[in-house]
Amino acid sequence: MRHRHKAKAAGNSHSPLPTVSALRFYSTQRVTMKKNHPRLKKAILEVVENQLSSNDPPETEQTLDRLLSEGYSESEAKEFIGAVVVSEVFEVLQAQKPFDEKRFVEALNNLPKIPE
């Protein structure tokens, strides 16, 4: 059984919310996020951890388990899930669409293909 660290609540004391372009960048360039946008990456991974610890939605943990069984590391799997979080945030902010759990779950089910 893997160990999960309880995620800390993301604070708003550092800087304003990331720009839509930064969110889009993360969803397509997740490997460079560590170097270029470490606070954004940390915040997105905290969202993933919160979803896992609350089991909401349950498909997040199911996706993590599936990706682990496919040979991805826990870190890689969580980054993939984070890309789906960013994609959904992008849709909400840029396209001004409401959160769509069906769209979110569909994107999780399509991993490791990154949402566009």
Image (cartoon, rainbow, N blue to C red):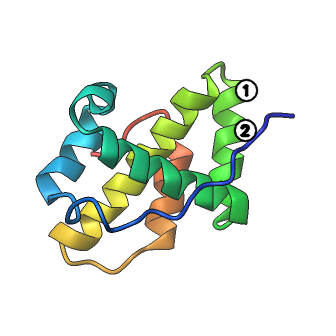
Q: CA distance from mark 2 to mark 1?
A: 6 Å
Q: Dot 1: what SS?
A: helix
Query: Could you say which is closer to the camera, residue 6 or residue 94?
Result: 6
Specify the amino acid type for callout 2.
Asp
Query: Could you say which is closer to the camera, residue 41 or residue 25?
Result: 41
Relative vertical location of residue 76 with respect to residue 104 in this rendering, above or below? above
Is residue 91 visible to us here? yes
Residue position marked by numbered label 2 in the rendering: 65
Question: Do the numbered discs 2 and 1 sit on residues whose CB atoms are within 8 Å?
Answer: yes
Q: Position of residue 28 (x, y in %)?
A: 25, 36
Q: Position of residue 50 (x, y in %)?
A: 60, 60
Q: Is residue 8 left or right of residue 2?
A: left
Q: Residue at x 56, y 47 (%)?
A: 109
Q: Residues within 10 Å of mark 2 (few under 14, many from 20)?
A: some
Q: Residue at x 20, y 78 (%)?
A: 96
| Quadrant that contains the N terminus | top right
Is residue 115 visible to us here? no
Residue position marked by numbered label 1 in the rendering: 69
Specify the amino acid type for callout 1.
Ser
Q: Residue at x 32, y 54 (%)?
A: 87
| Quadrant that contains the C terminus | top left
